[in-house]
Image (cartoon, coloured by chain):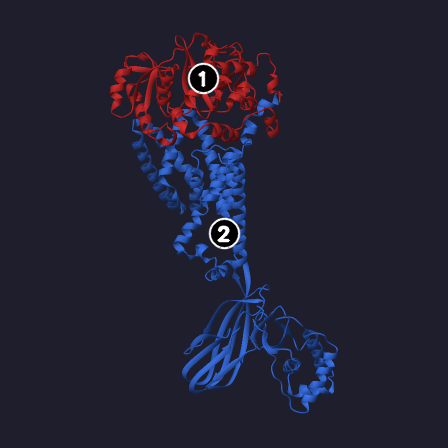
Amino acid sequence: MWASPFSLSRAGILGMNRRNVAYIGRYNDRSLYPLVDNKLRTKLICQKYQLTVPKLLGMVQQQHEIEHVLDLVQSFHGFAIKPAKGSGGKGILVITGRSGDDFIKASGDVITLEDIKRHLSNILAGLYSLGGKPDVAIMEELIEFDDRFEGYSHQGVPDIRIIIFQGYPVMAMLRCATHESDGKANLHQGAVGVGLDIATGRCLNAVQFSTPISHHPDTGKQLKDIEIPHWQEMLVLASRCFEMTGLGYIGTDLVLDKQKGPLLLELNARPGLSIQVANGCGLLPRLRHIEKLKKRHDSAEERVSHAMDVFGMAAGTEPESLAG
Amino acid sequence: MINRASFYVIVLLLIVGGLSLAWLRHSQMELPFTPGEERPVWLVEARVDFNARDRAVLASLDLPDNPPGFRLFTEQAASPGYGFSVIEHDGNRRGEWSIRRALGPQTLYYKAQFIADPDIEDAPEAEAPEPALVDWDEPQATAAAQLLSQASTRSSSPQSLARELMKLINQPEPGQNAALLLANHSPAELLNKLVNQAGIPARVSLGLYLEDARRRQSLTPMVEIYADQRWLVFDPKSGQQGLPENLLLWHRGGESLLDVTGGSGSSVSFAIIKQTVPALQLARAQAEESGFSPFSLYRLPIEEQSMFKMLLLLPLGAFVVVLMRIVVGIKTSGTFMPVLIAVAFLQTSLVPGMVSFIAVVAFGLLLRGYLSRLNLLLVARIATLVILVVFIIAIMSLVGYQLGFNTGMTITFFPMIIMAWTIERMSILWEEDGPREVLIQGSGSLLVAVLAYLAMQSKLMSHLTFNFPELHLVLLAFILLIGQYTGYKLSELKRFRAMVEND
């Protein structure tokens, strides 16, 4: 029924309290939070640092701008509306196509222009933002996800979460939406988490609701075959967020666009712990390895190759340096 | 990040400071640690009777001042038509009744409550008293001298001299000398005179044996002998040294016990009752005089006191939330919402409160489901919900009243806006994360609220938080410590169970 705390500790599993006190509290300066808590600001600074992000189509800051912005967006085939200060994927509306005057959601449901307007005004009123503070809605270009992910995700785009600690990628997973998760990529709602090998981007392990599975529950596609293309490029992109934000412990969410390659979707200063379940291994030994490094690498490329050397699990055994 | 060592020092200081302050107040003010504690109190009523001779009367009764082993709690005098005041002179208190003219039998009362406290002792006298001068008539002088020399050969100290003298006096068949002296003196007077003659200061005091429900008691003479800078009490009848536990020394040395001018045939008698008084009441009465009184909340007006009573419970609720969220890992909707719900439960009592809360939220969710189709702006929607919540509560109150429950009224104590926000958030949660999450967070909030309620409604807790507010420092220290807890939550032992089972 319950695991003993000692066995969890032996497995190197990072708990919520330790994450908050020893990692987020110690390595993430609170003054830097607004940068990642506000998707608009993240996007702008990413452009400054030349990190690739989905293109910003427009934004709505005031109620009266809604009409005018929609006019702008209607010319696009598909787009996504997001609250700038939303968290956990709340309030994200993805439009994938048109049906006459109406819009088609990623789920296939058809909604009217009125529905979109209401959604926008809910965002402005702060319904999805932390503490209910007034917010801004941003609209961005739709991601055309890579064909190689076909069948791995129900409705939504599968996204890749990479934990970056001190600029080193320490753990990664692919999150695939399911029918049960209602097209959302949140593991606690039933999305499939696929642990990825840092060295290769290959599937290590897959879980749904903390239970190991081998096939996607909706499409029946075998998850073991997953291998993320442009893997190193992705890790470098994620790794560069360290310099950009100055945050020591972040979760980076990326997607792979068919044309543009890896894109940075958003950053999270308080990334969740389910990634450990998806990988079937604890974060602590890797975090401690980085903490004990005598000399940190300066460039993102060097950090990525170090992480690929040390955290790779392709050989099936834990590297020496992590044994203790 | 602050230095860890200094952090633990602060935590330790908070704990030690809080506990020692509480202990100090407990011992100094006799504030009880548990509610409902009672203390025995002796109510002694002195009754002075005399015949007035149709002129101005002044009756003066010696009052006990700091009798060893007792503490004076309250005192009052009741005597119609008489003026009364307590006169203090040379550390000796006397109650004085006065009236311009009185005739016939008069009765005056003085009542005082005493708390037994064995810790109270006489303060050492500032300067040694002089032995009283003694004169005897012949042949008493010879008898006294012989008795004294007989006793002093067998003794080495004032105490042993007194004991030997008492043996000689109290023999079943006293010797010739003792018998001669006892013919004119009471044993107490005789002992007093003999000891003084030996050059040792002594005095006759009058004590009252405290026994429950006694009336018409008189004072018992005791002899006090000055030795080792203290007055030592001897019972001349039994020959015992030391103050009996239930003896209240009413009149000690000094002037007479009772003086009445303008009256005759005066006498004083005592009635005694043992009462019990809540220890808290005793402590509060004493708080007025104690040096701790500036720290005491009892000084506030009653209305504010009752507000503070509630306010001081909040940290307890917050502590429960901290425990549940950090150590156990229960999900709640809104961090401290459970505390507010618990406070509302305090006013409604648990079951009606829970029923009302669940009913209002459930109704609200239903109505909110309809509202979401109306395409309203968020603020307007929440304002609508506030009004709906008011209506729901009003209807529930009416229905409850018709059915004979008057608990309906009390749910108005629930903070309206919070209820409205709860409904709104729950409804969003329903739409975004499904009913499962609503159930998890809703029942989590309710569970924590009930636990916080149980902690806050306990008599002991409300007693401690209000009477020992300094204990909040200890609570604060624990919250700080838990804030540093990096171990696993209880819920995580379940969440990550699958990961270690495979090993």
Compute the Cα span from label 2 to label 1: 54 Å
User: Which chain is tinted blue?
Assistant: B
Circle 1 Cα neighbour tier, 10 Å, few/some/many (<14 / 14–19 / ≥20): many
User: Which chain is tinted red?
Assistant: A
- Both on one chain, marks 2 and 1? no
**Is B86 situated left or right of B133 in this image?**
left
Could you tell me which chain the residue with mark 1 belongs to?
A: A
Label 1 sits on a secondary structure element that is helix
Q: Which residue is mark 1?
A: A238
Disc 2 marks a residue whose amino acid type is: Phe
Q: Which residue is mark 2?
A: B468
Identified at 70% across, 87% down, the residue is B143
Position of the C terminus of chain A by quadrant: top right
Vertical placement of residue B431 versus B398, above or below:
above
In the picture as drawn, the residue positioned furthest to the front comes out as A295
Residue A263 locus on image (x, y percent): 41, 14
Q: Are marks 2 and 1 in contact (CB under 8 Å)?
A: no
**Is B370 situated left or right of B239 in this image?**
left
Disc 1 marks a residue whose amino acid type is: Ala
Circle 2 Cα neighbour tier, 10 Å, few/some/many (<14 / 14–19 / ≥20): many
Residue B13 locus on image (x, y percent): 53, 45
Residue A120 locus on image (x, y percent): 31, 23
Vertical placement of residue B187 versus B38, above or below:
below
Identified at 60% across, 19% down, the residue is A321
Residue B372 locus on image (x, y percent): 33, 27
**Closer to the camera in the image, A260 or A302:** A302
Viewer can see residue B198: yes
Label 2 sits on a secondary structure element that is loop
Give the number of the mark in front: 2 or 1.
1
**Closer to the camera in the image, B385 or B114:** B114
| Quarter residue B497 falls in | top right
Position of the N terminus of chain A by quadrant: top right
